[in-house]
Amino acid sequence: MWTDNHCHLPTESAEVIESLLDEARSLGVTRFVNVGCDLAGSRAAVASAAAFRGVFATVGVHPHEAQHGCDGIAQLAGSPGVVAIGECGLDYHYLHSPKEAQRAVFAEQIGLAKTLDLALVIHTREAWEETFDILDQEGMPARTVFHCFSGGPDEAQQCLERGAVLSFSGILTFPSADLLRQAALLCPLDAMMVETDAPYLAPVPHRGKKNRPGLVSVVGESLAGLRGVSSEVLAEATSAVAERIYRFEANTVAP
C-alpha cells in the first residue's frame, strides 16, 4: 500500500476531497500527508486530519509566505493529527519573500520541530548551500524530509550524510531529470519516500494535468522500475519510512 507523504488537498468541499481520496484508495494509496504552507492552509490541513480517514497534517510557513512570519503555527502544532512542521525552507527562484525573512522563518521552524519532537518538511529551491548552512547552525531535527527532492547525486549525498530522508515526486518521470534519477539510484531504500505534491507536478504520462494523490502510485512504480525492484517492495519500503518519520499510528484522528 502506498503513502502519499506530501499533497495539498483542495478546500472547496468535503465531497471533492472524499472523491480524490476514494480514487487514491482504489489505486492502493492508504495514507496522505496534507501539507500546510501558511496559517490558513495549516488550519485547513488540521481540519482534514480530523475529518478524513488516513489523512494527517503538517503545519508551517512556506518560504513564499515567510514575510508574514510564523505567528500561530506553534499553537496549531499541538493539534491532533499533526505529524510535522513545514513545508518550510528557502526558495530563491521567485523570492516572493525577502531572503532575510526566509532564513529567519526557516530557522524558527527548525527550532519548533525540535522542541515539539515533530518531523521537519523542507522545501529548497536554488538555495542548497544556505539550506545546509542553516540546518548545520540550528541543528537538524532527527526526522527531516527533503520534500520534492530535485537535486542531483551531490545534493542527495549531503542530505543523506545529515540523516535526512529524500521524497521523490513526479519530477522523477520528466525526461530532463537525469541527475535526479541518479540521485534516486544512490539513495538507500530506507531513506526514501514518494509523494505527489498534488495538485502540482503530475507525473508522465499525466504531465500538464492537475495532479491527484492517487498518482503517487505512478511515481512509485517509476521509482521501482528505475531501481529494478517490484512495486510491492517499493511501496512497502517507502511506507515503512513514512511511518517512521511521521509516526502515523500514534497520531491517527479520523476513524
Image: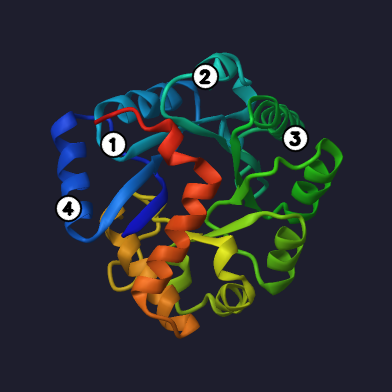
Q: Mark 4: give few (<14), some (14-19) or many (20+) Cα within 10 Å.
A: some
Which residue has dot 2 on it? 78
Q: Amino acid at mark 3?
A: Arg
From the image, state whether disc 2 or disc 3 is nearer to you: 2
Q: CA distance from mark 2 to mark 1?
A: 23 Å
Q: Is residue 101 left or right of residue 125?
A: right
Q: Is residue 210 visible?
A: no
Task: Give residue 209's position: percent from left, percent from top.
Answer: 27, 59
Which of the marked residues, 1 or 3, is nearer the chain's N terminus? Answer: 1
- The residue under the point 56% across, 80% down is 178
Label 1: element kind? loop
Task: Give residue 113's position: percent from left, percent from top.
Answer: 65, 31
Indicate the quadrant where residue 120 lies.
top right
Q: Do callouts 1 and 4 mark residues in contact (Cβ within 8 Å)?
A: no
Q: Amino acid at mark 2?
A: Gly
- Colour treatment of the image: rainbow
Which of the marked residues, 2 or 3, is nearer the chain's N terminus? Answer: 2
Which residue has dot 4 on it? 23
Q: Residue furthest right?
A: 137
Dividing the image into 4 quarters, which one contains the N terminus? bottom left
Task: Give residue 251's position: percent from left, percent from top.
Answer: 43, 32
Q: Mark 2: give few (<14), some (14-19) or many (20+) Cα within 10 Å.
A: few
Indicate the quadrant where residue 19 lies.
top left
Which residue has dot 1 on it? 10
Label 4: element kind? helix
User: Which sits in the foreground, 249 or 242?
Assistant: 249
* Disc marking residue 103: 3
In the displayed structure, would residue 51 be above or below residue 74? below
Which of the marked residues, 1 or 4, is nearer the chain's N terminus? Answer: 1
Which of the marked residues, 2 or 4, is nearer the chain's N terminus? Answer: 4
